[in-house]
Amino acid sequence: MNKTYQLTDLLTKTQEELASIAQEKLTSCGYTLEIKEGKYIVGTTETENPITLLAHLDLVNKTPPQPQDIIFESEHTTTPERTDERTYTGAVYRLENSQATCLGADDRNGIFAIFSLLDKGYRPYVIFTHDEEVGCVGGGQLREDLENLPQLRDILNQSAMLIQVDRGSKYHFDEVVYYNEKNEQFMDFIQDFGFTDGRKDERVTGSSTDVRVLSEILTPATCNVSAGYVREHGENELCLWDGLTATIDKLERIMRKCQAEGLVFEKVR
Ligand SMILES: [Zn+2]
């Protein structure tokens, strides 16, 4: 049975616990899995013109927060990390009096987004990785293994695009970042759904993440979109609930459009 999870259920799990939840979830949704224990979970299924979604299972602090440490505020005003151009007022999850050093919405929000889409009946290809925060360990392992997994590589290469759901909102609440991407059509397409165009803002560049590592071996166009968290890796990390649900909505519309129109975007280097 496909079990449904609340965000708090995911925020309070360790990387290992999340890995087994993710494995169970994908299996119950009918996915074929390629797993390397402690490194990655790749789920593929028979979907017409799928996109591939990625999120990482680890969090910066090894101890996740306890349920009682997580406060939900239905109204909270904040601004992005390094600019005061825009203000956000909406519901947030934040930590209080916790042993944990951060909320871990980076990247539990990404996992929650993918789970939500599965619950809505969508079947994108899915990649969950371990230890992204300590140098894309799982992503790097998968990149290496894909050299010897031509069948899986071919399947993933059929996806319309690779989207990591793991971008903080440093400068905008709905950021997208590209990694050495020159496919203008793809970037226009993503922007049309309401993500803030990273090309026009020189500050919006991303450090390494799994999708960047995997784009070294896979052919679809790639990006990393805002997962609705701000001030990640610190005790003031927030999950912007409306930002997270807005991203889920955008991803839903992207999938529907790709499917309806048979769109596929290749990476242009
Ligand atoms: Zn992250």
Image (spheres, rainbow, N blue to C red):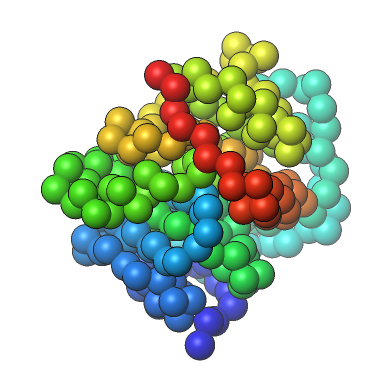
Residue 93 appears in which quarter of the rendering? Answer: bottom right
Q: Is residue 167 above or below residue 8?
A: above
The one nearer the camera, 114 or 269, is 269
Question: Is residue 61 visible from the viewing direction of this image?
Answer: no
Which residue occupies the extreme left position in the image? Answer: 148
Residue 102 screen position, x and y as percent: 51, 49
Judging depth in this view, the residue of 238 and 99 nearest the camera is: 238
Residue under the image location 51 percent in, 88 percent down: 1
Residue 13 image point, x, y percent: 45, 67
Which residue is drawn at the image coordinates 21% and 61% (left, top)? 36
Question: What residue appears at the point 30 percent right and 44 percent down from the top-left corner?
Answer: 139
Q: Residue 178 at x, y = what percent?
A: 51, 26
Residue that lies at the very extreme toward the bottom in this rendered image: 1
Residue at image position (37%, 44%) is 157
Give whichever of 197, 154 is nearer the camera: 154
Left or right? Give the position of 237 relative to 56: right
State the image coordinates of residue 101 (x, y, percent, origin top left).
48, 49
In which quadrant of the rendered image does the C terminus lie?
A: top left
Quadrant in the rendering for residue 191: top right
Tell which of 8 and 218 is nearer to you.
218
Residue 254 is left or right of residue 36, and the answer is: right
Q: Is residue 72 visible?
A: yes
